[in-house]
Amino acid sequence: MPTADQPRFLRSRWAMPTFCLALGLAFLVAGLLGDDPGSGVGGLAVMSAVGIAFLALSPRSDTVAGLAGPGRDERWAAIDVHATAFTGMVLIAVILGAFFYELATGRDGEPWSQLGAVGGITYVVAVVVLRRRT
Amino acid sequence: MQNDVRELRTAAGLSQQQLGEELDVSRQTINSIEKERYTPSLPLAIAIARFFRTTVEEIFHADR
Protein backbone atom coordinates (compact mmCIF):
# COMPACT_ATOMS: atom_id res chain seq x y z
CA MET A 1 0.00 0.00 0.00
CA PRO A 2 1.60 3.33 -1.01
CA THR A 3 2.02 5.68 1.89
CA ALA A 4 3.89 8.67 0.48
CA ASP A 5 1.84 11.82 -0.02
CA GLN A 6 4.19 13.46 -2.46
CA PRO A 7 3.73 13.01 -6.21
CA ARG A 8 6.24 10.60 -7.68
CA PHE A 9 8.33 13.25 -9.46
CA LEU A 10 8.80 15.22 -6.24
CA ARG A 11 10.29 12.06 -4.74
CA SER A 12 12.71 11.60 -7.63
CA ARG A 13 16.37 12.52 -7.23
CA TRP A 14 15.91 14.96 -10.10
CA ALA A 15 13.19 17.07 -8.48
CA MET A 16 15.30 19.61 -6.63
CA PRO A 17 18.08 19.79 -9.26
CA THR A 18 15.41 20.49 -11.87
CA PHE A 19 13.93 23.21 -9.70
CA CYS A 20 17.39 24.71 -9.17
CA LEU A 21 18.04 24.70 -12.89
CA ALA A 22 14.71 26.36 -13.56
CA LEU A 23 15.52 29.07 -11.01
CA GLY A 24 18.94 29.51 -12.55
CA LEU A 25 17.42 29.96 -15.99
CA ALA A 26 14.99 32.48 -14.53
CA PHE A 27 17.99 34.33 -13.10
CA LEU A 28 19.63 34.30 -16.52
CA VAL A 29 16.56 35.55 -18.37
CA ALA A 30 15.95 38.27 -15.80
CA GLY A 31 19.56 39.34 -15.95
CA LEU A 32 19.58 39.49 -19.73
CA LEU A 33 16.32 41.41 -19.80
CA GLY A 34 17.63 43.80 -17.18
CA ASP A 35 20.83 44.39 -19.15
CA ASP A 36 22.87 42.75 -16.40
CA PRO A 37 24.09 39.51 -17.98
CA GLY A 38 26.75 39.10 -15.31
CA SER A 39 24.16 38.70 -12.58
CA GLY A 40 22.14 36.40 -14.80
CA VAL A 41 25.06 34.14 -15.55
CA GLY A 42 26.17 34.26 -11.93
CA GLY A 43 22.71 33.30 -10.74
CA LEU A 44 22.59 30.41 -13.19
CA ALA A 45 26.02 29.24 -12.05
CA VAL A 46 25.08 29.38 -8.36
CA MET A 47 21.78 27.56 -8.82
CA SER A 48 23.43 24.95 -11.03
CA ALA A 49 26.02 24.35 -8.32
CA VAL A 50 23.25 23.99 -5.73
CA GLY A 51 21.45 21.47 -7.93
CA ILE A 52 24.63 19.46 -8.43
CA ALA A 53 25.23 19.55 -4.68
CA PHE A 54 21.78 18.11 -4.06
CA LEU A 55 22.44 15.32 -6.57
CA ALA A 56 25.81 14.50 -5.06
CA LEU A 57 24.82 14.69 -1.38
CA SER A 58 21.39 13.01 -1.48
CA PRO A 59 22.79 9.47 -1.34
CA ARG A 60 24.97 10.40 1.65
CA SER A 61 22.55 12.30 3.85
CA ASP A 62 18.96 11.52 4.87
CA THR A 63 18.32 15.20 5.50
CA VAL A 64 19.56 16.27 2.09
CA ALA A 65 17.63 13.40 0.52
CA GLY A 66 14.48 14.67 2.21
CA LEU A 67 15.12 18.21 1.03
CA ALA A 68 16.07 17.11 -2.47
CA GLY A 69 13.33 14.62 -3.21
CA PRO A 70 14.46 10.98 -2.96
CA GLY A 71 13.89 10.85 0.78
CA ARG A 72 10.43 12.40 0.69
CA ASP A 73 7.83 10.28 2.38
CA GLU A 74 4.75 11.13 4.46
CA ARG A 75 6.86 12.39 7.36
CA TRP A 76 8.72 14.75 5.07
CA ALA A 77 5.40 15.87 3.61
CA ALA A 78 4.25 16.77 7.13
CA ILE A 79 7.56 18.54 7.85
CA ASP A 80 7.22 20.43 4.57
CA VAL A 81 3.68 21.57 5.39
CA HIS A 82 4.65 22.81 8.84
CA ALA A 83 7.83 24.48 7.59
CA THR A 84 5.90 26.20 4.81
CA ALA A 85 3.25 27.42 7.24
CA PHE A 86 5.92 28.75 9.61
CA THR A 87 7.68 30.47 6.72
CA GLY A 88 4.37 32.03 5.68
CA MET A 89 3.78 33.35 9.17
CA VAL A 90 7.26 34.86 9.31
CA LEU A 91 6.75 36.51 5.92
CA ILE A 92 3.37 37.88 7.05
CA ALA A 93 4.99 39.34 10.16
CA VAL A 94 7.76 40.93 8.09
CA ILE A 95 5.32 42.33 5.53
CA LEU A 96 3.06 43.78 8.22
CA GLY A 97 5.99 45.21 10.11
CA ALA A 98 7.48 46.78 7.00
CA PHE A 99 4.07 48.15 5.93
CA PHE A 100 3.40 49.81 9.28
CA TYR A 101 6.95 51.14 9.39
CA GLU A 102 6.52 52.68 5.96
CA LEU A 103 3.25 54.33 7.01
CA ALA A 104 4.74 55.56 10.28
CA THR A 105 7.60 57.19 8.39
CA GLY A 106 5.28 59.03 6.04
CA ARG A 107 5.53 56.73 3.01
CA ASP A 108 2.74 55.01 1.11
CA GLY A 109 3.44 51.47 2.29
CA GLU A 110 4.09 50.00 -1.13
CA PRO A 111 4.93 47.31 -2.17
CA TRP A 112 4.20 45.88 1.28
CA SER A 113 0.49 46.61 1.04
CA GLN A 114 0.31 44.75 -2.27
CA LEU A 115 2.29 41.83 -0.93
CA GLY A 116 0.03 41.70 2.12
CA ALA A 117 -3.04 41.74 -0.12
CA VAL A 118 -1.67 38.87 -2.20
CA GLY A 119 -0.97 36.91 0.96
CA GLY A 120 -4.40 37.53 2.44
CA ILE A 121 -6.28 36.68 -0.74
CA THR A 122 -4.17 33.58 -1.29
CA TYR A 123 -4.92 32.35 2.22
CA VAL A 124 -8.68 32.85 1.86
CA VAL A 125 -8.74 31.12 -1.53
CA ALA A 126 -6.69 28.24 -0.16
CA VAL A 127 -9.05 27.83 2.81
CA VAL A 128 -12.11 27.86 0.53
CA VAL A 129 -10.62 25.33 -1.89
CA LEU A 130 -9.29 23.01 0.81
CA ARG A 131 -12.53 23.18 2.77
CA ARG A 132 -14.44 21.98 -0.25
CA ARG A 133 -11.96 19.22 -1.00
CA THR A 134 -11.80 17.73 2.47
CA MET B 1 2.28 7.43 20.23
CA GLN B 2 3.71 4.47 22.08
CA ASN B 3 4.35 1.51 19.84
CA ASP B 4 6.16 -1.79 19.53
CA VAL B 5 7.69 -1.24 16.10
CA ARG B 6 11.28 -1.50 17.35
CA GLU B 7 10.58 -4.79 19.11
CA LEU B 8 8.83 -6.25 16.07
CA ARG B 9 11.55 -5.04 13.72
CA THR B 10 14.42 -6.44 15.77
CA ALA B 11 12.58 -9.72 16.27
CA ALA B 12 12.28 -9.95 12.48
CA GLY B 13 16.00 -9.30 12.12
CA LEU B 14 15.54 -6.14 10.08
CA SER B 15 17.41 -2.88 10.16
CA GLN B 16 15.56 0.41 10.13
CA GLN B 17 16.74 0.89 6.55
CA GLN B 18 15.38 -2.49 5.49
CA LEU B 19 12.03 -1.93 7.15
CA GLY B 20 11.83 1.50 5.56
CA GLU B 21 12.43 0.02 2.13
CA GLU B 22 9.72 -2.57 2.69
CA LEU B 23 7.25 0.15 3.67
CA ASP B 24 8.43 2.74 1.11
CA VAL B 25 9.47 5.25 3.76
CA SER B 26 12.86 6.56 4.85
CA ARG B 27 15.04 5.13 7.61
CA GLN B 28 14.56 8.41 9.47
CA THR B 29 10.81 7.91 9.46
CA ILE B 30 11.15 4.43 10.96
CA ASN B 31 13.52 5.83 13.57
CA SER B 32 11.09 8.64 14.42
CA ILE B 33 8.21 6.19 14.76
CA GLU B 34 10.23 3.94 17.05
CA LYS B 35 11.28 6.89 19.19
CA GLU B 36 7.62 7.94 19.34
CA ARG B 37 8.41 11.35 17.88
CA TYR B 38 6.27 10.76 14.81
CA THR B 39 2.83 9.19 14.60
CA PRO B 40 2.35 7.45 11.24
CA SER B 41 -0.64 8.07 9.04
CA LEU B 42 -3.43 5.51 9.00
CA PRO B 43 -2.27 3.96 5.69
CA LEU B 44 1.29 3.62 7.00
CA ALA B 45 0.11 2.21 10.33
CA ILE B 46 -1.97 -0.38 8.49
CA ALA B 47 0.99 -1.18 6.21
CA ILE B 48 3.19 -1.72 9.28
CA ALA B 49 0.59 -3.97 10.87
CA ARG B 50 0.15 -6.02 7.71
CA PHE B 51 3.90 -6.33 7.28
CA PHE B 52 4.23 -7.81 10.75
CA ARG B 53 1.03 -9.85 10.30
CA THR B 54 -0.75 -8.28 13.22
CA THR B 55 -3.21 -5.47 13.90
CA VAL B 56 -2.74 -1.73 14.34
CA GLU B 57 -4.06 -1.97 17.90
CA GLU B 58 -1.47 -4.61 18.75
CA ILE B 59 1.36 -2.32 17.66
CA PHE B 60 0.21 1.20 18.53
CA HIS B 61 -1.05 2.05 21.99
CA ALA B 62 -3.08 5.23 22.24
CA ASP B 63 -4.19 4.58 25.80
CA ARG B 64 -0.79 4.10 27.44
Image (cartoon, helix red, strand yellow):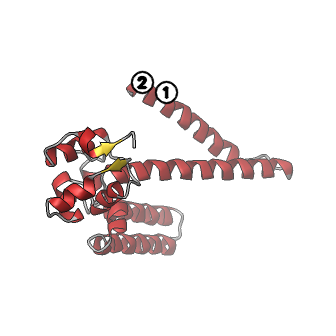
Report the side of B49 relative to A99 (left or right): left
Tag 2 subunit: A
Disc 2 element: helix
Q: Position of residue A50 (x, y in %)?
A: 39, 72
Tag 1 subunit: A
Q: Residue at x 45, y 26 (%)?
A: A131
Q: How many marks?
A: 2
Q: Residues within 10 Å of mark 2 (few under 14, many from 20)?
A: few
Q: Residues within 10 Å of mark 1 (few under 14, many from 20)?
A: few
Q: Position of residue A112 (x, y in %)?
A: 69, 48
Q: Residue at x 79, y 46 (%)?
A: A108
Q: Position of residue B20 (x, y in %)?
A: 22, 58
Q: Nearer the viewer, residue A117 or B22?
A: B22
Disc 1 element: helix
Q: Which mark is residue A132?
A: 2
**What amino acid is at disc 1?**
Val
Q: Position of residue A94 (x, y in %)?
A: 67, 53
Q: Quadrant of residue B28?
A: bottom left
Q: Residue at x 54, y 37 (%)?
A: A122
Residue at numbered disc 1: A128
